[in-house]
Amino acid sequence: MPGAGVNILNRLPTTALVKLVEAYNANLPEGAEPQPLPTMETAMAAITARFEQMLKVFLDAPSGGFEPFIRDYEDRWLHSCVPQSVTAEPNPRQALTRPI
């Protein structure tokens, strides 16, 4: 089943959000206010608040659903023409991902 996750605190084996904020804070100009380090609670609150805003746009969109988000989606899509192994079917195969 497809899913998504955000690594907030676990520094290994991937990059955690807290590590990115630390790196950002380490390179601030003198006198600039550092960003607070994220916690599980603050990250969840921020994600949930943003999700609520986006859900309202999604549900209220006059053209229906995803239309207001297409440009942002296309601008941020990272996986065009990346080979993927499709293994959740009887005959596993290679496929290329493409944006919607």
Image: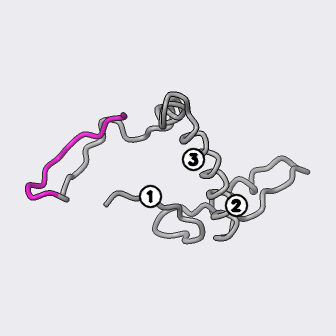
Query: In terms of secondary structure, what is the magenta stretch mainly?
Result: loop
Please, what is the three-letter code of the amino acid marked with disc 3?
Leu
- Residue 59, label in figure: none
92 in relation to 16, above or below: above
Residue appearing at x 62%, y 52% in the figure: 52
- Residue 55, label in figure: 3
Residue appearing at x 50%, y 28% in the figure: 63
Residue 8 image position (x, y, % from top left): 59, 66
Residue 84 image position (x, y, % from top left): 25, 48
What crowding class fits label 1: few (fewer than 14 Cα within 10 Å), some (14-19), or many (20 or more)?
few
Which residue in the protein does label 1 denote?
A: 4
Mark 1 in CB contact with mark 3 (< 8 angstroms): no
Alpha carbon distance from label 2 to label 3: 31 Å
46 in relation to 65, above or below: below
The secondary structure type at the circle numbered 3 is helix
What number of labels is visible? 3
Closer to viewer: mark 1 or mark 3? 3
- Quadrant assignment, res 41: bottom right
- Residue 22, label in figure: 2
Closer to viewer: mark 2 or mark 1? 1
Alpha carbon distance from label 1 to label 3: 17 Å
Please, what is the three-letter code of the amino acid marked with disc 1?
Ala
